[in-house]
């Protein structure tokens, strides 16, 4: 029998049992749906996580108080909350979880040692309520210095940035989104806002940077470090350093390590580069991929077992048909091919349906929740390939059983 005839015979056999085929392929549909959705969500999360890290600062070097996982730790990191706390205390050489030994003024000492084109600023993060008129908003407050716009690569949209000549004054700079939500069309420059009840004069507004993943890069408040963050005016959570290139980033990390040893005198801090942060994010993504593989493997096995069971039933129901075909000259290879094609077609149909449903689901999630999933050719190919493989693998045993039937016994079989 030619390949085209085998294909037509397989389609005809499946068409005679449409409901059975539909119910059988549900497992494959769910498996391919999960593969497609999880790969798309995982790819989107990985891409946006990378963008989020790179948006910190160009080729960033980060100095933080306490323990922060580095590239060398990536393979041993646990994402269990209790184990994470233990790692922060023991993996960080007993570093304290609260307080800080870092002082904002150290940023200027680091700045003196940096090559041209590199900038350092302190960062102390807190959550504050900003009020103007009848409007209020809870936002992140960053206590920093005048280098912050250079570190982040931002220009002023209106007004000016604060500097050391403002020392002793309660001044602030707004992110553009915060300005829109609190001030609307009113020019905020020169006006006062209340930050947790304390009066601050607005000196300027930073230009917008937009969204990165679920993070709004324009919904924040900047205050001078001498005003103080949650640690007070004399302490900071860490430092953020920008560099002009990846080669410079590696040199700057070494400079920061040497300078911090001289300034602090102990190891109560961690220094990581953008490359190490990306490696850590990659580790988290790989863990997500492993979890996804386990989930989809279970769904695909269920779908494959369904295909194998229904094909065994089909072989049993078609004993006489198989006996007649063998009696008129059909060989075992032709019988094997027909039943195998039927199984593969069920896997194919389930794969196509699962990918189509997955695509609709992804687009609905993007529309409703603004979640940046990424549909790639890779996710389509993997979902499609696994569906075909499941059909072929689980259909092989029923097809072999049909091919090995004795024609005489088959003709005498009563269904």
Image (cartoon, helix red, strand yellow):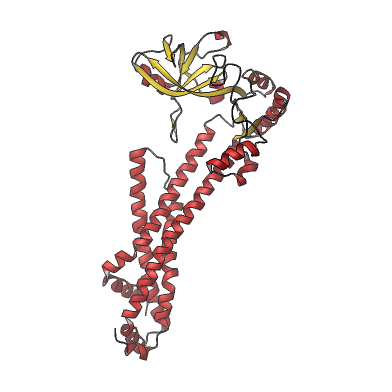
Q: In which quadrant of the rendered view does residue 398 lie?
A: bottom left
> Looking at this view, is 117 or 339 the one in front?
339
374 vs 130, nearest the viewer: 130
Where residue 146 sits in the image (x, y, percent)? 56, 16
- Compared to residue 79, the image places residue 396 above or below, namely below
Q: Report how many numbered discs are placed on residues in the image.
A: 0
Q: Quadrant of residue 365?
A: top left
Q: Nearer the viewer, residue 110 or 199?
A: 199
Residue 386 coordinates in the image, percent (x, y): 44, 61
Q: Position of residue 119 (x, y in %)?
A: 61, 23
88 vs 106, nearest the viewer: 88
Question: What quarter of the picture does the N terminus occupy?
Answer: bottom left
Q: Is residue 68 left or right of residue 397?
A: right
Residue beneath the point at 31% across and 67% down: 21
Residue depicted at 36% across the width and 50% down the height? 359
Residue 216 shows in this picture: yes
234 sits left or right of 202 in the view? right
Q: Which residue is at a point 61% across and 47% down the rendered structure image?
A: 75
- Asked if residue 275 can be seen in this view, the reply is no
Which x, y percent locates residue 50?
52, 38
Q: Quadrant of the C terminus?
A: bottom left
Above or below, 185 against 15 in this view is above
């Amino acid at each position: 029998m030619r390949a085209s005839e085998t294909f037509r015979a397989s389609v005809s056999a499946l068409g005679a049992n449409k409901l059975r085929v539909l119910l059988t392929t549900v497992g494959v549909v769910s498996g391919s749906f999960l593969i497609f959705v999880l790969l798309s969500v995982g790819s989107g999360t990985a891409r946006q996580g990378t963008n989020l890290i790179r948006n910190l600062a160009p080729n960033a070097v980060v100095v933080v108080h306490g323990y922060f996982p580095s590239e060398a730790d990536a393979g041993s990191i646990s994402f269990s909350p209790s184990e994470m706390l233990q790692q922060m205390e023991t993996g960080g050489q007993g570093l304290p979880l609260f307080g800080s030994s870092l002082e904002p003024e150290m940023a200027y000492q680091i700045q003196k040692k940096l090559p041209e084109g590199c900038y350092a600023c302190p960062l102390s993060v807190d959550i504050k309520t900003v009020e103007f008129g009848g409007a209020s908003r809870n936002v992140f407050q960053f206590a920093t210095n005048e280098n912050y716009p250079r570190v982040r690569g931002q220009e002023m949209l209106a007004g000016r940035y604060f500097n050391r000549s403002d020392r002793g004054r309660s001044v602030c700079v707004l992110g553009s989104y915060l300005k829109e939500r609190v001030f609307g069309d009113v020019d905020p420059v020169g006006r006062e806002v209340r930050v947790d009840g304390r009066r601050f004069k607005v000196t300027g507004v930073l230009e917008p940077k937009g969204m990165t993943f679920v993070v709004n890069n324009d919904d924040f408040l900047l205050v001078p470090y001498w005003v103080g963050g949650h640690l007070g005016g004399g302490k900071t959570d860490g430092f953020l350093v920008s560099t002009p290139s990846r080669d410079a980033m590696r040199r700057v990390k070494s400079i920061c390590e040497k300078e911090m040893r001289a300034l602090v005198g102990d190891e109560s801090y961690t220094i990581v580069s953008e490359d190490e942060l990306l490696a850590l994010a990659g580790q988290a993504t790989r863990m997500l991929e492993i979890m996804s593989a386990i989930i989809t493997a279970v769904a695909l096995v269920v779908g494959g077992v369904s295909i194998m069971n229904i094909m065994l039933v089909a072989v049993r129901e078609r004993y006489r048909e198989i006996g007649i075909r063998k009696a008129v000259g059909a060989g075992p290879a032709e019988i094997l091919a027909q039943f195998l094609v039927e199984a593969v077609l069920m896997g194919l149909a389930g794969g196509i349906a699962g990918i189509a449903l997955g695509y609709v689901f992804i687009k609905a999630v993007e529309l409703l929740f603004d979640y940046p999933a990424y549909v790639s050719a890779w996710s389509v190919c993997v979902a499609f390939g696994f569906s075909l493989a499941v059909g072929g693998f689980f259909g092989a045993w029923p097809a072999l059983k049909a091919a090995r039937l004795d024609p005489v016994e088959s003709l005498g079989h009563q269904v």
